[in-house]
Amino acid sequence: MSVAALAIRPLQRLFSWKVRGIRWVEIIGVVLVGVMILSVYVAKAGAARESARISDLERQISENGERVRLLRAEVARLEQPGRLEALSRSAGLGPVEMKRQETEANLPNLAPIPEPRPVVIAPTPAAPAAAPAAEAAQ
């Protein structure tokens, strides 16, 4: 026999080995196909979960975009100059008249006069209070 024939013979014996009438190569092939089917199922389920999560995030983004648009419209309404002027006039505020404006040199004259500080009266010594305690002890 040649060397090549000796090398091929164990491989033929390996592939022809049977377990209960079925070659072990076929058993391994069926197991591998089952594992591949299971892995495709798991990957598909994971992709479906991610797809649902992505659609949920897209929905939240669109809702937040709508909220932002409404809030910007509310800010624009609240910042209308006519509305702010009406509110300030109802609160007794108004624009400063030209004759009431002062120069920088007159600012110290406009400063409020500080109120006088309250006078603190020191408490009297506690010596007279000790005398009744001495009388009670006798």
Image: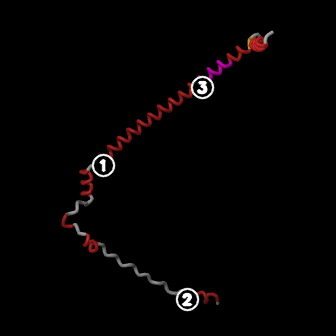
Residue 48 at x, y percent in the picture? 53, 27
- Of discs 1 and 3, which sits in the foreground? 3
The residues colored magenta run: 31-41
The residue that disc 3 covers is 42
Q: Which is more toward the observer, 69 or 103?
A: 103
The vertical placement of 35 against 136, above or below, is above
The vertical placement of 99 against 87, above or below, is below
User: Position of 84 compared to 46: left or right?
Assistant: left
Residue 118 at x, y percent in the picture? 40, 79
Q: Which is more toward the observer, 83 or 47?
A: 47
Residue 101 quadrant: bottom left
The residue that disc 2 covers is 127
Residue at image location 27% in from the left, 59% down from the top: 91
Q: Amino acid at mark 2?
A: Ala
Asked if marks 2 and 3 touch (Cβ < 8 Å), the reply is no
The residue that disc 1 covers is 78
Along the polypeptide, which appears first: circle 2 or circle 3? 3
**CA gap, disc 1 and disc 3:** 54 Å
- Of discs 2 and 1, which sits in the foreground? 1
Q: Amino acid at mark 1?
A: Leu
